């Protein structure tokens, strides 16, 4: 970490590292394997530093779970890094090629984006994930974490730098900036240094970065997630899917926020809601759903909804329920409130399924499955640098391929243009 900060010097160091670092795939993979091993070997150190951050946060804060490291989570992080190491390099792929009538041979090949800046909040795993994905894809990363995770991030970057130094690699291929606001402002204005800026965190953070950055931004948006239980849906599937999507890990962006249910299936709410009640999920429901659940769901966590509950990313054990009379009403509700992250339908009607897949505008659209699968590792990408909810350059979980661009190679033999 850089304390007495000269941001220009910091960015120049990163640019210098980008220009002079040209590693073989074998070296890249060995470094990643060593980082994974070091994370496991220094689990105690990581947990000690993480506890310093946890001690300063209210456990009721939705970010607490995102901030928390455990032995199992560190093992998962290490496994993801190893998976990235074992994946094929995304660089140097010939995406297209042709020989023109004038003899020019033109090819398009994949190349690294360059210097990737990432601004994120209380998610220390992002430090490992971003480094591994950027390093594997030939990118340099400049990281700016939040104050909530400052001790954790410092510990993680120290482990990464130890491994880089062991391999005689410039440590500026991965830089952690101070958590102060000034670091973010410097990144916003780092034109000519940072090639792309990726915010990960709350909608407020994402909006702030988008509004203030002069550097191109890839939005990894908030997840306001819906699941629609269609008139033809299987109640058993719905019960399992909704419970998993809501409760597996409530603080992540793929967690379910709103169940939309067809009015013809309201009686199935008793079955669907039963495990949610046992898990103490607080429900905010419209009047038709309230009439079904009143007296059949813990009264202290059952409330009538207000308009504000729809379009809310809860990031906690809270969920809204909306009743609709038609498939079109379900689509309209999703269109009005979705953040275009992940949306799902539970249905056995092939016509409605195809219409849902074709008409719902989201990065990931599900049929009869939990939205909890929207994740780079689950999609076979090794890990993710974020889940893009925009449409330019990348959409959905961003893995190695999404961290590349391309350039044109033109080979001739003295041709000139008339």
Image (cartoon, grey):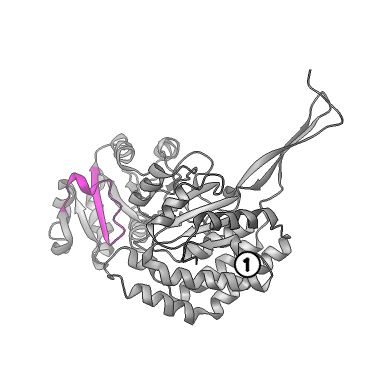
Q: Quadrant of residue 54?
A: bottom left
Outermost residue, right side:
413
Tell me where residue 25 appears, x and y as whole percent.
72, 60
Relative image position of residue 160 (x, y in whole percent): 57, 69
Secondary structure under the numbered disc 1 in the rendered image: helix
Q: Residue at x 63, y 67 (%)?
A: 32
Which x, y percent locates residue 382?
57, 60
| 81 and 199: which is toward the camera | 199
Q: Is residue 211 left or right of residue 263?
A: right
Question: Residue at coordinates 19% horizontally, 51% vertically from top-left?
Answer: 285
The residue where tag 1 is placed is: 32
Given residues 71 and 260, the one toward you in this image is: 71
Q: Viewer-proximal residue, 231 or 205?
A: 205
In the rendered image, residue 247, in percent from the top left (x then y), is placed at 33, 63
Q: Is residue 44 magenta?
A: no
| Residue 381 visible, this angle | no
Residue 314 colored in magenta in the image = yes
Q: Give the magenta range.
A: 304-323
């Amino acid at each position: 970490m850089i304390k007495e900060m000269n941001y220009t010097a910091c960015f120049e160091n990163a640019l210098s590292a980008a220009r002079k670092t040209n590693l073989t795939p074998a070296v890249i993979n060995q470094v990643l394997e060593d980082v994974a091993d070091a994370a496991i070997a220094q689990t105690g150190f990581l947990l000690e530093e993480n506890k310093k951050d946890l001690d300063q946060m209210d456990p009721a804060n939705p970010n607490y779970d995102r901030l928390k490291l455990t032995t199992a989570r560190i093992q998962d992080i290490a496994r993801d890094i190893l998976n990235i190491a074992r994946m094929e390099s995304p660089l140097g792929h010939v995406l297209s090629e042709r020989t023109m009538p004038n003899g020019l041979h033109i090819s398009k090949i994949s190349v690294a984006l360059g210097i990737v800046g990432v601004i994120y909040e209380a998610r220390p795993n992002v430090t490992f994930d971003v480094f591994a994905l950027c390093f594997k894809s030939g990118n340099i990363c400049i990281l700016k974490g939040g104050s909530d995770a400052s001790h954790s991030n410092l510990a993680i970057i120290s482990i990464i730098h130890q491994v880089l130094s062991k391999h005689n690699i410039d440590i500026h291929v991965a830089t952690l900036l101070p958590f102060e606001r000034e670091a973010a402002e410097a990144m916003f204005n780092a034109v000519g240094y940072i090639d792309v800026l990726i915010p990960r965190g709350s909608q407020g953070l994402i909006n702030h970065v988008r509004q203030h950055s002069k550097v191109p931004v890839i939005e990894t948006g908030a997840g306001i997630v819906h699941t629609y239980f269609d008139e033809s849906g299987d109640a058993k599937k719905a019960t399992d899917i909704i419970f998993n999507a809501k409760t597996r890990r409530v603080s992540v962006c793929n967690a379910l926020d709103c169940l939309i249910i067809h009015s013809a299936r309201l009686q199935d709410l008793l079955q669907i809601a039963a495990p949610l009640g046992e898990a103490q999920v607080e429900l905010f429901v419209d009047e038709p759903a309230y009439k079904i659940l009143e007296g059949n769901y813990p009264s202290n966590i059952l409330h009538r909804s207000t308009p504000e509950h729809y379009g809310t990313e809860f990031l906690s054990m809270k969920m809204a329920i909306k009743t609709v009379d038609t498939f079109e009403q379900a689509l309209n509700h999703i269109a009005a409130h979705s953040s275009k992250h992940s949306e799902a339908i539970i249905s056995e009607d092939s016509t409605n399924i195809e219409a849902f897949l074709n008409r719902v505008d989201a990065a990931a659209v599900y049929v009869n499955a939990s939205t909890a699968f929207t994740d780079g590792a689950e999609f076979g990408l090794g890990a993710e640098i974020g889940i893009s909810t925009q449409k330019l350059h990348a959409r959905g979980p961003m893995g190695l391929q999404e961290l590349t661009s391309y350039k044109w190679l033109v080979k001739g033999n003295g041709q000139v243009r008339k």
